[in-house]
Amino acid sequence: LPTDKWVESSFWNFDSLFQPQSHPARDAHDTFFIKEPASTVSVPEEYYERVREMHEKGGAGSIGYRYDFKREEAFKNLLRTHTTAISSQMLYKLANQEGGFTPQRYFSIDRVFRNETMDATHLCEFHQVEGLVADYDLSLGDLIGTIETFFKKIGIERLRFKPAFNPYTEPSMEIFGYHPDLKKWTEIGNSGMFRPEMLAPMGLPENVRVIAWGLSLERPTMIKYRIKNIRDLFGHKVDMARTRTAPICRFQEVE
């Protein structure tokens, strides 16, 4: 995924994901909005109208949210709260590429921003690992198997999946990993299958399913290397001597 752009419009970060404009995540106490420039210049106009229609009136078996969709809200600039803002752009391009849809897999690791209260497991600025697969007739089993395989390969085998709600995925699951030193289950990611209300305006075929997962990079690293405080791993309180002496990469055999 081309994730080198930290500033996004609310349209790509929220609206294209079928997240209503009244959602609490869009408040200033959860999101960092940009003062200058405060608004984006443009979005694909035909796609914008299909997204607006889906929010206001529904489609693809949905009744929508039944509210007046505001252009000025969609055009607000912000520091992206997740790299899913890029995923929506890539899926839109995939649906409208020359020759039509072809199955694809996307993956990224990059910076995201949330207006969080910082503590031992929360930061305002952190890294998200994101993956998605777009193909015909995928299932929730494909998603669970992919996530379990991923974490097993980095040495985390104690996982729990909890049903959750996301505006843009259904079904949705929170992913928890057990931290042996904190002696508690820590949320390390979110996942689900993108909703038809998100995919239909893009122009994807009806039987295309997209499984997706977003994982914190820092929290699994805390579990893997038994770090108790996330601020010892990333941020202004990091021990620079430890950073300078840390291996560039580590390899571990997986059966």
Image (cartoon, grey):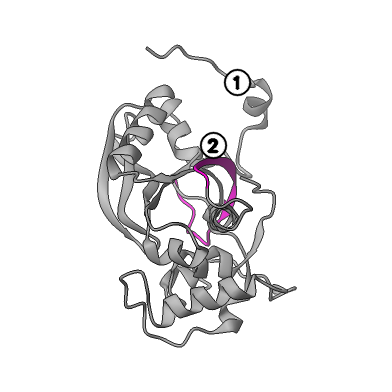
Residue 22 appears in the picture as rendered: no
> As rendered, which of 189 and 150 lies closer to the eye?
150
Camera-nearest label, 1 or 2: 1
Question: Compared with residue 7, is residue 244 higher up or lower down, i.e. above or below?
Answer: above
Left or right position of 159 against 102: left
Quadrant in the picture for the C terminus = top left
Identity of the residue drawn at 51% across and 66% down: 16
Residue 196 in picture, x, y percent from top left: 38, 62
Q: Residues within 10 Å of mark 1 (few under 14, many from 20)?
A: few
* Label 1 SS: loop
Residue 82 in picture, x, y percent from top left: 53, 55
Q: Residues within 10 Å of mark 2 (few under 14, many from 20)?
A: some
**Mark 1 to mark 2: distance in Å?**
18 Å
Question: Compared with residue 249, is residue 162 higher up or lower down, i.e. above or below?
Answer: below
Identity of the residue drawn at 45% across and 39% down: 219
Residue 14 in picture, x, y percent from top left: 51, 67
Residue 107 in picture, x, y percent from top left: 54, 40
Range shown magenta: 102-120
Corner quadrant of residue 85: bottom right
Q: Amino acid at mark 2?
A: Asp
Residue identifier under label 2: 232
Residue identifier under label 1: 249
Identity of the residue drawn at 49% across and 59% down: 116
Quadrant in the picture for the N terminus = top right
